[in-house]
Image (tube, grey):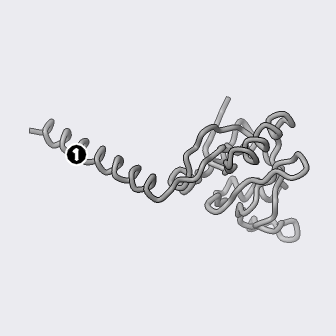
Amino acid sequence: MNTKTITENRQARHEYFILESYEAGIELFGTEVKSIRSGGVNLKDSWISVDNGEMFIRGMHIAPYEKGNIFNRDPYRIRRLLMHKKEIMKLYGQVKQGGYTLIPISMYFKDSRVKVQVGLCKGKQLHDKRDAAAKRDAAREIDRAMKEKNQR
């Protein structure tokens, strides 16, 4: 299977602990797919909600296709995600009971289809973000020291 990453939601990894991830299809129109192929998509402030047993992605921006004229859709319209009903209900139960959030982590092509990686996430507190930054900085310093030592 061919997979090609289109975009990633880097902010999600900073703001949330990602507990599990799932793959979902997404319902798109032709001009939206063409715009995605040209890189006109942004997942930064998007989230996923479950309504009436269906999953919807909200806040995702897909830029209008340049040559799309009247066929272009609203860039911020709500788009339906495609998953099995059992998976949707399982995620819905965890969101309602456990206080988790559903966030799109990345978007990619799998063969010719657009897929979204959905993350079951728990929000980070400020001290968690600081701990993660401190660990990252410490690892960077260790790598620099090792590289400097190996050059001598």
- Which of the 4 image quadrants contains residue 110? top right
Taking the view exactly as shown, the residue that stands out farthest to the front is 97
Q: Position of residue 15 (x, y in %)?
A: 54, 55
Q: Mark 1 — residue?
A: 144
Vertical placement of residue 87 versus 42, above or below: above
- Which of the 4 image quadrants contains residue 112? top right
Q: Position of residue 142 (x, y in %)?
A: 24, 42
Determine if residue 40 is in view. Answer: no
In front here: 28 or 101? Answer: 101
Vertical placement of residue 35 versus 52, above or below: below
In front here: 24 or 108? Answer: 24
Q: Residue at x 65, y 58 (%)?
A: 43
Q: Position of residue 137 (x, y in %)?
A: 31, 51
In front here: 91 or 44? Answer: 91
Report the side of 15 relative to 55 (left or right): left
Task: Look at the image and tell me in which quarter the C terminus lies.
Answer: top left
Type of amino acid at the residue the image marks with label 1: Arg
> SS for tag 1?
helix
Q: Position of residue 19 (x, y in %)?
A: 60, 39
Taking the view exactly as shown, the residue that stands out farthest to the left is 152
